Amino acid sequence: MYQILSKTELAQGTVVANEIHAPKIAAKAKPGQFIILRVNETGERIPLTMANTNEERGTITIIYQVVGKTTALLASMSAMDHLADVVGPLGRPTPIEKKGTIICVGGGTGVAVLHPITKGFKEAGNHVIAIIGARNKDLLIMEKEMKAASNELYVCTDDGSYGHHGFVTDVLKEQLEKHGAAVKEAVCIGPVPMMKFCSKVTKDFGIPTMVSLNAIMVDGTGMCGCCRVQVGDETKFACVDGPEFDAHKVDFDGLSARLTAYQKQEKEAMDAYQKKCSCSTEA
């Protein structure tokens, strides 16, 4: 179980896609849900949203950026290697129904999370406008897939190396000015600052907006409380109440602070891992 069937490097070796054999999860998973995995028996548990599922093949696809020890370990694995365990599908599925015009905005690896949601809204009969962005052209992922999953696609890069020169919020504002009240909902998924500023734009236009929060998680079943986020006047658990919430109620500053709570320990773990890899190479 949980064999990696394929491994693809999507962007400069820092963004990796793994197709994993997990037939029971593939049969049940819906857009917006996630898994929690461990690379090995002593590894930490990390949440990753599924970019795709294939019930026929019995597989799920995860796309992740190498940012710490666990994702580095995961990226070092080869096709046919096995993961220690994979738990899912977890979280509440995205509520998808026919509404009219929907704007889907994705940044960085958030595009992978956005893909099945965008596809779901289009298949439900909505007119879907997708906006995706990255720091530069080399870090842009899933353009072809997002084009197929939407009716209109706009691409942005921070440095102007491809598509619109600027941020996804620029194009989001343009589309809201163009379509106005015809836009029934926006979905924004990506780095916390991106989601925060997208929600500010949509709030000015009175457009209901949903964001997906990848908070710190341990058990993924609501028992530990590590993934708590402030949504309006309530404390919610991202694992069982989410991962999707009303963007206009999320305390993004509080979420950012919680996500950096273990930055020092994460850096120490990554440094030790890289040193160990370096010593092994030299030997």
Image (spheres, grey):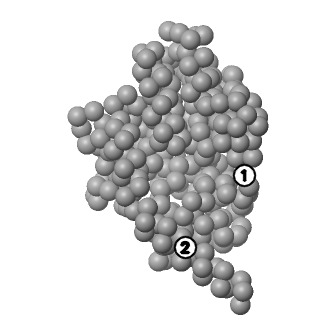
Farthest residue, direction front: 159
Q: Single out the mark in the foreground, 2 or 1.
A: 2
Examine the rendering and report whether any part of residue 160 can be seen: yes
> Which residue is at a point 43% across and 43% down the rendered structure image?
213
Q: Quadrant of residue 196?
A: top left
Image position, residue 127 (x, y; %) = 62, 18
Residue type at tag 1: Ala
Residue type at tag 2: Asp
Residue underneath mark 2: 271
Residue 147, placed above or below residue 254: above
Image position, residue 249 (x, y; %) = 33, 31
State the residue in front, 104 or 33: 104
Examine the rendering and report whether any part of residue 92 can be seen: no
> Horizontal placement of 226 versus 25: left or right?
left
State the residue in front, 245 or 131: 131
**Kind of element beneath mark 2:** helix
> Which residue is at a point 75% across and 46% down the rendered structure image?
138
Q: Earlier in the sequence, mark 2 or mark 1?
A: 1
Image position, residue 170 (x, y; %) = 60, 24
Residue underneath mark 1: 11
> Which residue is at a point 60% across and 75% down the rendered structure image?
274
> Horizontal placement of 58 versus 12: left or right?
left
